[in-house]
């Protein structure tokens, strides 16, 4: 009576177990193994790898005797017969490695095996299962009764895959961002700043002035954890190792001053910052950068994780510089333009230095050249005047084109004697220019005047203009041509 009760209990436990249970007959598999051993097979893994048909032979040798309710639920089967008839749908895809591992454990004489593998429910669901199998006691000689349990850990594996995909997504966003990204550790920098506070220092700005070496020390303590692909492209590095081994070539020059500002902001509690800085590529070219710096919220306490984004604004800076250049320069002659001249004259009138001298200059014969040879020839002569004045006039003096053929040189802090010396230099450069460009000679009419204060600036400009026009009239009278006609020069 007790044995029947024990048998019934066993049946109930098998049927109602919370995990998938399979009772199988492996006797045909043992006979297959015995045959292979008789043929001299010693390495079952190699034997199965040589011919995939052998693995199918092993699978065909396994006979399912019974499964429990949880198995039918898990694999979406109506009955044992329904499940067995569709085992090819349950054990599909490439299971060679996992199946070979299970078979190898039995081949080596083990009475049980375990493995993580993938099965499929009859409705197509992927099942990640932990397989455990045990040859039941009393059947070790023929393997005719084997209990197999399948623990469904699909949910855990799906969670792990989601985390992995999320991490990979984040990694891809980092690596392939169109912006240069740096992950850095500033914890040592924080320790240094905390050490300064502990000394009772309150005025950090003054501290940096007294101890400028502290900035360099902090820069050396920054640890770069990672950079992305755009960073390598931006700085001309073939690998992360190459960039990080040459970091001193990237952050140099004026970076010391900008990092001092960054330290001051960190001292003041600004853990998010943005500023424009200049870095350098490994080829030595300056790279203008818009930098954003942020200590991640999870590391506010130690600054152990900092994200920097760097946007290359070199092209924008060049465009801005060019626009600024155009705003202050004459495009044709490359000298300063009338707008800059007016601004500079206004500044000098208010502030000096004194005395201020003015050289008024006019290109002789430009109208005749334009009429006879075309405006291209006239533009060529104007460009040559720009070359002459650019070589002759040095800062703080300023040479500007203020009209079609009119030029002015402002000489702050220069008396009339200094202006005459510059006029001689202009004449010397003019002669060299005429030798370099044979054919059409340049001829300039010049007038000089000086003043001692802002009240006399306008009068000095008028006197310089009058002197220039008098010189221009003498030139045309001596050449024997009307000033509106093209003069003829020897040679």
Image (cartoon, rainbow, N blue to C red):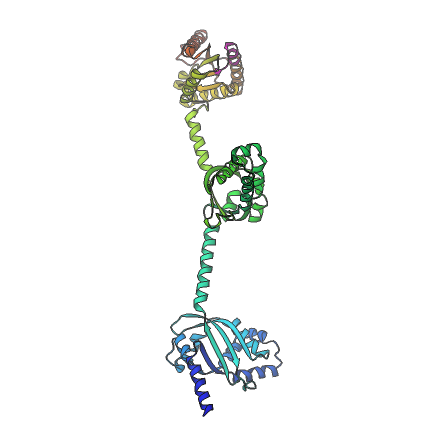
Q: Position of residue 404 (x, y in %)?
A: 40, 19
Q: Which contiguous range is marked in magenta?
A: 411-422
In the rendered structure, the answer to whether residue 145 lies left or right of residue 12 reads right
Q: Determine the image quadrant of residue 9.
A: bottom left
Of residues 443 and 158, the one drawn nearer to the viewer in this rendering: 158
- Image: 112 above or below 245: below
Q: Quadrant of the N terminus?
A: bottom left
Q: Is residue 419 magenta?
A: yes
Q: Is residue 105 visible?
A: yes
Seen at 45% across and 40% down, the residue is 274
Q: Position of residue 147 (x, y in %)?
A: 49, 81
Of residues 362 and 255, the one drawn nearer to the viewer in this rendering: 255
Work out which residue is located at the far front of the displayed protein and give it. 200
| Number of marks in picture | 0
Q: Is residue 360 magenta?
A: no
Q: Position of residue 143 (x, y in %)?
A: 53, 84
Work out which residue is located at the far bottom of the displayed protein and give it. 1
- Image: 196 above or below 334: below
Q: Is residue 236 visible?
A: no
Work out which residue is located at the far left of the displayed protein and give it. 78
């Amino acid at each position: 009576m007790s044995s029947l009760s024990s048998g019934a209990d066993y049946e109930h436990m098998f049927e109602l177990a919370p995990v998938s249970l399979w009772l199988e007959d492996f006797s045909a598999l043992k006979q297959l193994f015995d045959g292979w051993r008789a043929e001299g097979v010693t390495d079952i893994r190699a034997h199965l790898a040589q011919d995939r048909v052998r693995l199918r032979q092993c699978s065909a040798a396994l006979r399912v005797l019974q499964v429990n309710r949880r198995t039918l639920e898990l694999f979406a089967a109506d009955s044992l017969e329904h499940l067995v008839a569709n085992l090819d749908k349950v054990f599909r895809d490439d299971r060679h490695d996992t199946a070979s591992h299970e078979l190898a454990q039995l081949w080596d004489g083990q009475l049980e095996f375990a493995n993580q593998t993938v099965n499929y429910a009859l409705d197509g669901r992927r099942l990640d299962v932990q397989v455990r199998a045990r040859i039941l006691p009393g059947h070790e000689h023929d393997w005719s009764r084997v209990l197999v349990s399948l623990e469904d850990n699909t949910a855990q594996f799906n969670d792990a895959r989601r985390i992995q995909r999320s991490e990979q997504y984040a990694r891809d966003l980092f690596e392939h961002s169109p912006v240069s990204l740096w992950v850095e550790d500033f914890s040592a920098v924080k320790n240094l700043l905390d050490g300064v506070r502990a000394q009772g220092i309150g005025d950090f700005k003054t501290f940096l002035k007294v101890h400028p070496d502290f900035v360099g020390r902090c820069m050396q303590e920054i640890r770069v954890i990672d950079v992305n692909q755009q960073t390598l492209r931006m700085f001309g590095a073939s690998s992360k190792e190459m960039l990080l081994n040459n970091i001193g070539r990237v952050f140099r020059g004026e970076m010391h001053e900008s990092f001092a500002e960054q330290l001051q902001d960190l001292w003041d509690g600004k853990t998010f910052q943005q500023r424009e800085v200049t870095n350098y590529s490994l080829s030595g070219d300056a790279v203008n950068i818009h930098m954003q710096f942020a200590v991640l919220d999870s590391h506010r306490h130690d600054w152990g994780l900092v994200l920097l984004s760097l946007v290359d604004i070199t092209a924008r800076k060049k465009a801005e510089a060019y626009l600024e250049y155009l705003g202050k320069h004459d495009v044709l002659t490359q000298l300063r333009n009338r707008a800059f001249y007016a601004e500079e004259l206004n500044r000098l009138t208010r502030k000096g230095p004194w005395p201020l001298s003015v050289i008024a200059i006019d290109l002789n014969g430009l109208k005749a050249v334009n009429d006879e040879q075309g405006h291209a020839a006239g533009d060529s002569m104007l460009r040559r005047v720009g070359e002459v004045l650019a070589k002759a006039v040095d800062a703080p003096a300023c040479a500007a084109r203020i009209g079609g053929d009119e030029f002015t040189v402002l000489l702050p802090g220069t008396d009339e004697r200094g202006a005459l010396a510059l006029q001689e230099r202009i004449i010397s450069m003019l002669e060299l220019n005429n030798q370099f460009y044979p054919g059409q000679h340049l001829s300039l009419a010049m007038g000089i005047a000086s003043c001692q204060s802002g009240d006399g600036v306008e009068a000095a400009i008028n006197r310089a203009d009058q002197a220039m026009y008098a010189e221009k009239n003498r030139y045309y009278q001596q050449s024997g041509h009307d000033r509106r006609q093209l003069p003829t020069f020897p040679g």
